[in-house]
Image: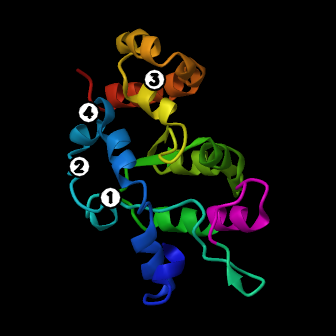
Amino acid sequence: MFARLLGSCSVELAAKKAAFAKGQKQIKDLLDAHGFARQLGLDLSGDLNDNPSLFTTSLVKCCLMVGGNYKYRAPDIVASPEARFCVCNRFVADIRKYPTLKWVVIFGEAGWEAINLLTVGSRTIYQNLEAQEIEVLNFPHFSQNFQQRAIFRLLPEQEEIYFKDHPTARAYAPAARKMRAALLSAMQRKWPV
């Protein structure tokens, strides 16, 4: 989609319009899980990229020119010098532009690894976000592992029923449980019952 939009939009506008264009339903489902969006007061109707309460971005969206062509796909973030540069410079700078941000959701394991390994100054990106008093959560990636997304959205007591119908999904449970536990713990700290 980004490549198509470049024909009629600036790079910045094309990146904004293309962000998560194919995954919005899944992203909304994940944000809605366990009442998270409701607690934040987020209205998830409409295009997430036009939601005034959300800042949508990608760790790697620098629109790098490589060999005269735009590099559209995010590489292995930590292994790529271009991707590392993008995360440590553009992503961090973008986040700092929004001092009212209180929550950052990183979708997927590659992004989570990147913010926990890459550094800006003497701290990891995760530590930099925490220093800004931002709660950082890891959710399943919206375009991969539908099993992990499904388990993440379940309550623990619903899992065994789900596994009876989807026995091969059990392999995705540890990561999904860890992400769900972190979300529920963060919500409990922020909004104690």
Residue position for label 4: 35
Residue 148 x/y as whole percent = 50, 31
Q: Residue 44, which numbered label?
A: none
User: Would you say the residues marked 1 and 2 are in contact, meaning their CB atoms lie under 8 Å apart?
Assistant: yes
Residue position for label 1: 54
Tell me where residue 188 sits by quadrant: top left
For marks 1 and 2, give the CA distance: 8 Å
Q: Residue 42, which numbered label?
A: 2
Which part of the image, by quadrant, shows the C terminus? top left
The magenta region covers 72-88
User: Would you say the residues marked 3 and 4 are in contact, meaning their CB atoms lie under 8 Å apart?
Assistant: no
Alpha-carbon neighbours of circle 1 within 10 Å: few (<14), some, or many (≥20)? some
Which amino acid does the dot numbered 1 rest on?
Leu
Tell me where residue 60 sits by quadrant: bottom right
Q: Secondary structure at mark 2?
A: loop
Does 41 appear above or below 186? below
Q: Secondary structure at mark 1?
A: loop
For marks 3 and 1, give the CA distance: 23 Å
